[in-house]
Image: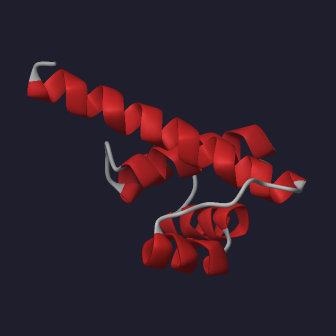
Amino acid sequence: MVQFSEEQKKDAVIELCTREVSAAAVADRMGTSRGVLYKWKNELLGKENKKAMKKSGKREIPDDKDDKMELDILKKATEIVKKAWASTSGI
């Protein structure tokens, strides 16, 4: 069984969340399954936080390691999406 570092998991979740490629493509590149990717996503972002983000769209300042990691992932995903949007919209 292949062991993945937290950084590898975090990078895969960012790639999954930005949807630049399919979940299957991310899984293939990582050498794992789509199910594992979604498991990592739930572990890193948490099911409750995912629901809260959809409802309010607001985030609180993180006060522990897990919240900080989640915020880092979301910030990176936002940067990637903004860059992709800018490159396709001609800005």
Relative image position of residue 79 (x, y in whole percent): 45, 32
Look at 33% across and 33% down and name the residue there.
Answer: 82
* Residue farthest toward the right in the current orientation of the protein: 64
* Residue farthest toward the left in the current orientation of the protein: 90
Number of residue marks: 0
Look at 87% across and 52% down and name the residue there.
Answer: 65
Colour setting? secondary structure
Residue 71 horizontal side relative to residue 54, left or right: right
Residue 35 horizontal side relative to residue 43, left or right: left
Name the residue nearer the viewer: 33 or 84: 84
Q: Is residue 54 above or below residue 33?
A: below
Relative image position of residue 40 (x, y in whole percent): 66, 62
Name the residue nearer the viewer: 63 or 83: 63
Residue 45 horizontal side relative to residue 82, left or right: right
Q: Quadrant of the C terminus?
A: top left
* Residue farthest toward the top in the current orientation of the protein: 91
Residue 7 horizontal side relative to residue 40, left or right: right
Q: Quadrant of the N terminus?
A: bottom right
Q: Is residue 12 above or below residue 46?
A: above
Relative image position of residue 77 (x, y in whole percent): 48, 42
Q: Is residue 46 above or below residue 2?
A: below
- Residue 89 appearing in the image: yes
Look at 22% across and 25% down and name the residue there.
Answer: 86
Residue 41's image quarter?
bottom right
Look at 35% across and 38% down and name the residue there.
Answer: 81
- Residue 28 appearing in the image: no
Relative image position of residue 31 (x, y in whole percent): 56, 48
Name the residue nearer the viewer: 41 or 27: 41
